[in-house]
Image: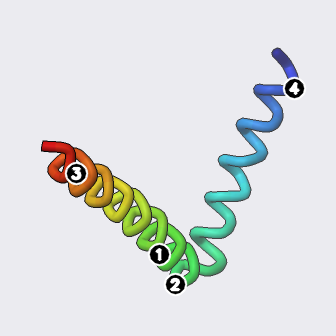
Amino acid sequence: MQVKKVLSWGGLGFAAYYLLARPNDAATAVKGTFDSVFNAADSLAQFVNNLT
């Protein structure tokens, strides 16, 4: 349990540092993640529509 807590705080600290040190790169990474999620949802919707 202690390792999970340390890794969680470390990840949060890294994310905060990355956001403050390289905001443009952080924004690009977040945008890319959201684009991937939306593309996956769109593909799933198309698949379900093609089933009927």
The residue at the point 47 percent across, 72 percent down is 32
Left of 22 or right of it: where is 1? right
The residue at the point 51 percent across, 84 percent down is 24
- Distance, label 3 to label 1, CA atoms, is 27 Å
What's the amino acid at mark 1? Ala
Please give the residue where the numbered disc 2 appears in the rendered image: 24
Q: Residues within 10 Å of mark 4 (few under 14, many from 20)?
A: few
Q: Quadrant of residue 43?
A: bottom left
The mark found on residue 45 in the picture is 3
The mark found on residue 7 in the picture is none
- Distance, label 3 to label 2, CA atoms, is 31 Å
Q: Residues within 10 Å of mark 1 (few under 14, many from 20)?
A: few
Left of 48 or right of it: where is 25? right
Q: Residues within 10 Å of mark 3 (few under 14, many from 20)?
A: few
Q: Most extreme residue toward the bottom, as rendered? A: 24
Instruction: State yes or no: discs 2 and 4 in contact (Cβ < 8 Å).
Output: no
Q: Residues within 10 Å of mark 2 (few under 14, many from 20)?
A: few
Percent x, y for residue 15?
Answer: 64, 58
Secondary structure of the residue carrying tag 1 is helix
Percent x, y for residue 33?
Answer: 47, 64
Q: Nearer the viewer, residue 13 or 25?
A: 25
Q: Most extreme residue toward the right, as rendered? A: 3
The mark found on residue 3 in the picture is 4
What's the amino acid at mark 3? Ala
What's the amino acid at mark 2? Asn
Instruction: State yes or no: discs 1 and 2 in contact (Cβ < 8 Å).
Output: yes
Q: Quadrant of residue 18?
A: bottom right
Secondary structure of the residue carrying tag 2 is helix
Left of 32 or right of it: where is 42? left
